[in-house]
């Protein structure tokens, strides 16, 4: 392993998962947090992750756990799975993670900083500008941002050649993708090091050689989901039939509406609202070509679901009902 000390900035949903997974894979992990209040919010997340990892390891030890849809690839390979060894790794990860408020202590001797703070451009810039004075020259910095491009921040890090994106998915232990995305000034040497680090923490590293909003997955997933929803709101067919068309026709495990229920109707609503904000286009014909979807119809349908409290799987009902 090229790196030893990994510092995660931000201990939210993703920051705590990245910290736990890195520690599980043997890295020396510190989570930098900005206040005592943040410690109070991050520690319970780490407690839950310890329980969650233990629970899934128990399941992985059963015949049902071997199902690829259940198996947590971030935890172990099927062939070499050793329950006791994995449980030990969980305990040592949990006991090893340090929570630190002092920047000088947190970033001292860091090999890698993973920025996973809230999606706020100004706050992220302020953080990079402040943090850079505490970093040794060797430190590589990555951002886990889902929607902001690394070129926006490169110059504020003081080391643009050692700065790029490393984008994780929620539930990192099962959904173990890590999209590694360079910006124009990233030195390929550090791109390769981050690919190696991603593999070292049991992620499937996916190279994104040019900046692209949505990386690989969301660049494909968002148009796919919108196309399904568009068929429904235009009265072409119903959610169940649209899902069946996709599943039976391609062998995929889920159709767009089943995915909406997992992602949450609220997130779907925000995506639709964001797309509508695309600035005015020159002619109605061009607008139709570039934005072929009935966004107003989508907004109306999704709003109705939200108003009725049908938020997806999390609330027991979305496009489908769940027990
Ligand atoms: N939630 C997801 O599914 C997901 C998936 C992939 C990537 N991401 C990305 O990960 C990053 C974090 O997302 P999250 O879901 O963990 O968010 P979150 O809201 O759960 O956590 C954000 C963390 O940032 C901290 N924070 C906010 N402002 C700060 C500041 N000024 N200084 C220091 N710390 C600050 C908060 O205290 C909190 O610990 C975002 O960039 C997001 O785009 C999220």
Image: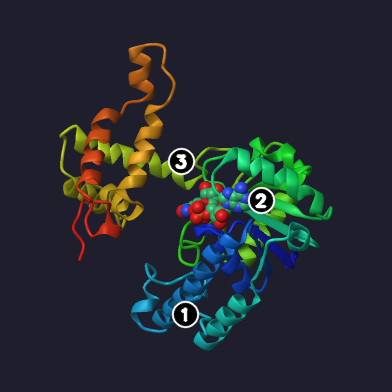
Residue 150 location, quadrant: top right
Other-residue count near label 2 (Cα within 10 Å), few / some / many at <14 / 14–19 / ≥20: many
User: Quick one: which residue is furthest to the bottom in this view?
Assistant: 84
Q: Secondary structure at mark 1?
A: helix
Q: Position of residue 289 (x, y in %)?
A: 35, 21
Which of the labelled discs sits on residue 54, or is there none?
A: 1
From the viewer's perspective, is 119 left or right of 155? left
Which residue position holds label 3? Answer: 219
For the residues marked 3 and 1, what is the alpha-carbon distance in whole angstroms? 34 Å
Kindly identify the residue that appears in the image at 70 percent across and 39 percent down: 154
Sequence-first disc among 3 and 1: 1
Sequence-first disc among 3 and 2: 2
Q: Secondary structure at mark 3?
A: helix
Let me know if residue 42 appears in the view: yes
From the viewer's perspective, is 8 left or right of 301? right
From the viewer's perspective, is 120 left or right of 219? right
Q: Which mark's residue is nearer the viewer, 3 or 2? A: 2
Which residue position holds label 2? Answer: 142
For the residues marked 2 and 1, what is the alpha-carbon distance in whole angstroms? 29 Å
Sequence-first disc among 2 and 1: 1
């Amino acid at each position: 392993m090229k790196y030893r000390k990994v510092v995660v900035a931000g201990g939210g949903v993703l920051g705590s998962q990245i910290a736990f997974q890195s520690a599980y894979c043997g890295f020396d992990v510190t989570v930098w947090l900005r206040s005592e209040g943040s410690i109070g919010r991050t520690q319970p997340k780490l407690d839950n992750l310890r329980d969650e990892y233990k629970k899934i390891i128990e399941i992985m030890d059963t015949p049902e756990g071997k199902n690829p849809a259940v198996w947590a690839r971030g935890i172990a390979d099927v062939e070499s799975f050793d329950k006791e060894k994995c449980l030990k790794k969980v305990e040592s990860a949990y006991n090893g993670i340090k929570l630190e408020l002092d920047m000088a202590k947190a970033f001292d001797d860091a090999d890698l900083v993973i920025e996973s703070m809230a999606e706020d451009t100004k706050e992220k810039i302020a953080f990079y500008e402040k943090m850079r004075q505490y970093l040794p020259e060797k430190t590589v910095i990555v951002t886990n941002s889902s929607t902001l491009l690394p070129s926006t921040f490169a110059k504020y890090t003081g080391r643009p050649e050692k700065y790029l994106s490393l984008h994780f998915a929620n539930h990192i232990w099962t959904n173990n993708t890590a999209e590694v995305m360079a910006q124009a000034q990233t030195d390929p040497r550090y791109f390769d090091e981050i690919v190696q680090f991603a593999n070292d923490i049991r992620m499937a590293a996916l190279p994104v050689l040019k900046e692209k909003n949505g990386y690989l997955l969301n660049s494909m997933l968002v148009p796919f989901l919108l196309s399904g929803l568009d068929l429904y709101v235009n009265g072409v067919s119903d959610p169940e039939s649209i899902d069946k068309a996709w599943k039976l026709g391609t062998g995929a495990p889920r159709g767009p509406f089943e995915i909406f229920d997992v992602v949450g109707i609220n997130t779907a609503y925000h995506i639709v609202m964001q797309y509508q904000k695309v600035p005015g286009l020159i002619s109605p014909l061009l607008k139709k070509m570039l934005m072929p979807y009935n966004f107003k119809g989508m907004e109306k349908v999704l709003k109705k679901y939200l108003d009725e409290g049908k938020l997806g799987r999390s609330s027991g009902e979305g496009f489908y009902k769940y027990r």
